[in-house]
Image (cartoon, rainbow, N blue to C red):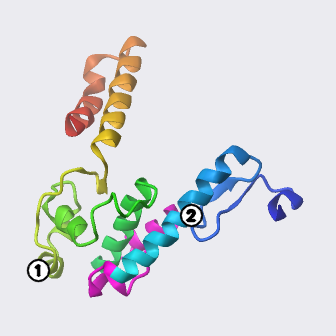
Amino acid sequence: MRAIACGLEFDELPYTEDLYQVTYEPLFPHLKRVICCGLAAKKWFRETAPPCARAIPLPLGFLNCKKLQGNAENNKIVLVGHFGSSLMGVNYDYQLHPPFYDYPCGLMADPCTPLHLREDPELLREFPPKLLEGLYGMCWSTPEMIFSVLQSLIHGRQLLRDRGVPEDELHQWDKTIARFA
């Protein structure tokens, strides 16, 4: 109401600081649910994460996750930022998402994880590499979510092909599709 009274079209969501359109009321129940789930996930993280991560509050929201991911001084902080992004991808459903310990172990085994994380001796000691099914591009997904992304990629590639984009220019699409297949 405050944002509307001030004539704003967008405002920050509480706790996440992400922007939302203040007049798009059909989205409000979903946003409220996500914020409540995020707060519950934050409490769960504080109670269950290993001590090295527990001291870092679980970030809620895109920008807060990115801030932690950009920390060049402490890779454990970076891991918590990526974990927050991954958890955000499943609307903070911490009962669905793998727990924190399993997540960085999966990152350490994934060739797509940046080398500065995968080769960090302290992280390797604390989180020995172990494949984590469902980990794609530093975010974990359910098989249903992966299937949906794969279908979208295939559809997008087909649209480009139908519009005359040459096959040799679709190579990057093919690589991305192969990663999800």
Instruction: Determine the residue positioned at 21% across, 54% down.
Output: 112
Q: Amino acid at mark 2?
A: Ile
> In the displayed image of the protein, which residue is found farthest to the front?
95
Magenta residues, start to end: 48-71
Check residue 162 in the rendering and tell me which mark sits there, or answer none. none
The residue where tag 2 is placed is 35
Please tell me whether mark 2 or mark 1 is closer to you in this view. Answer: 2
Spatial CA distance of label 2 from label 1 is: 34 Å
93, 52: nearer the viewer? 93
For the question of whether residue 45 can be seen, the reply is: yes
Q: Quadrant of residue 131?
A: bottom left
Q: Which tag, 2 or 1, sits closer to the chain's start?
A: 2
Check residue 125 in the rendering and tell me which mark sits there, or answer none. 1
For the question of whether residue 73 can be seen, the reply is: no
99, 116: nearer the viewer? 99
Left or right, 149 with respect to 23, comes to: left
Q: Secondary structure at mark 1?
A: helix
The quadrant the C terminus occupies is top left
Q: Amino acid at mark 1?
A: Arg
Name the spot of residue 144 as percent of width and height, x first.
32, 39
Q: Is residue 13 above or below residue 137?
A: below
Name the spot of residue 34 as percent of width and height, x first.
54, 59
Instruction: Determine the residue positioned at 62% across, 59% down.
Output: 32
Q: CB of mark 2 within 8 Å of CB of mark 1?
A: no
The quadrant the N terminus occupies is bottom right
